[in-house]
Image: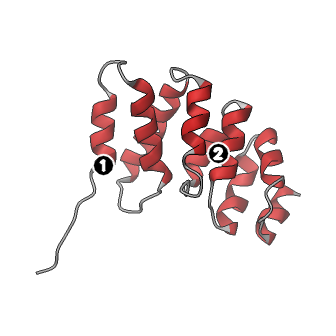
């Protein structure tokens, strides 16, 4: 018998996020941490809901806290959609997000047109930019 595992972390976090404002920075951090890992097994509707909730909470979590949490994602931010959301934040958070992201060359190239001018500037400063991304940045 095959051992099946169902990953309901995102749905659980979304249910908990609907509670009161207590611990909002922690709830935002949990949500962003799960979304950053870009697991393919999550329901696309739940991912969209999670991104919407993360955006909603951004204004309620201090920018310094958001920056700290995003820096902690270094090397684990693998979601282009979450990166787009975070790269549109204040400069410190945007810089941390672009630095923390680990996307494939084609993923970077796909989102470059949707990134803010500032975020594209942060991307230009990365050392390991692939040819497709370089072309998109031009």
Question: Which quadrant does the N terminus fall into?
Answer: bottom left
**Residue depicted at x 68% and y 54%:** 111
- In the rendered view, does 114 fall on the left or right side of 83? right
Which element is circle 1 on?
Answer: helix
Q: Quadrant of residue 124?
A: bottom right
For the residues bearing labels 2 and 1, Cβ distance under 8 angstroms: no
Q: Is residue 68 left or right of residue 99?
A: left
CA gap between label 2 and label 1 equals 22 Å
Residue 35, position in %: x, y?
46, 48
**Quarter placement of the C terminus:** bottom right
Residue 32, horizontal then vertical, whole percent: 47, 42
Q: Residue furthest left?
A: 1
From what the image shows, is residue 16 above or below residue 61? below
Question: Which of the 4 image quarters holds residue 132?
Answer: bottom right
Q: Residues within 10 Å of mark 1 (few under 14, many from 20)?
A: some
Residue beneath label 2, please?
A: 97
- Residue 71, given in percent of the width and then of the height, sits at 60, 44
Q: Which residue extends farthest bottom?
A: 1
The residue labelled by disc 1 is 9
Q: Is 86 displayed left or right of 131 in the figure?
A: left
> In the rendered view, would you say 106 is above or below 49?
below
**In percent of the image, x 64 and y 62: which residue is there?**
107
Q: How is the image coloured?
A: secondary structure
State the image coordinates of residue 45 (x, y, percent, origin top left): 38, 47
């Amino acid at each position: 018998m095959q051992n099946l595992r169902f990953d309901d972390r995102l749905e659980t976090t979304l249910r908990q996020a609907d509670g009161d404002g207590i611990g909002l920075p922690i709830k935002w951090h949990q949500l962003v941490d799960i979304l950053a890992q870009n697991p393919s097994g999550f329901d696309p509707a739940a991912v969209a809901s999670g991104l919407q909730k993360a955006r909603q909470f951004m204004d309620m979590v201090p920018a310094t806290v958001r920056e700290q949490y995003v820096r902690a994602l270094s090397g684990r931010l693998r979601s282009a959609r979450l990166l787009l959301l975070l790269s549109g934040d204040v400069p410190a958070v945007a810089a941390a997000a672009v630095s923390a992201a680990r996307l494939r060359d084609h993923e970077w190239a796909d989102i470059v047109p949707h990134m803010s001018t500032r975020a594209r500037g942060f991307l230009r400063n990365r050392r390991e930019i692939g040819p497709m991304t370089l072309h998109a940045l031009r």
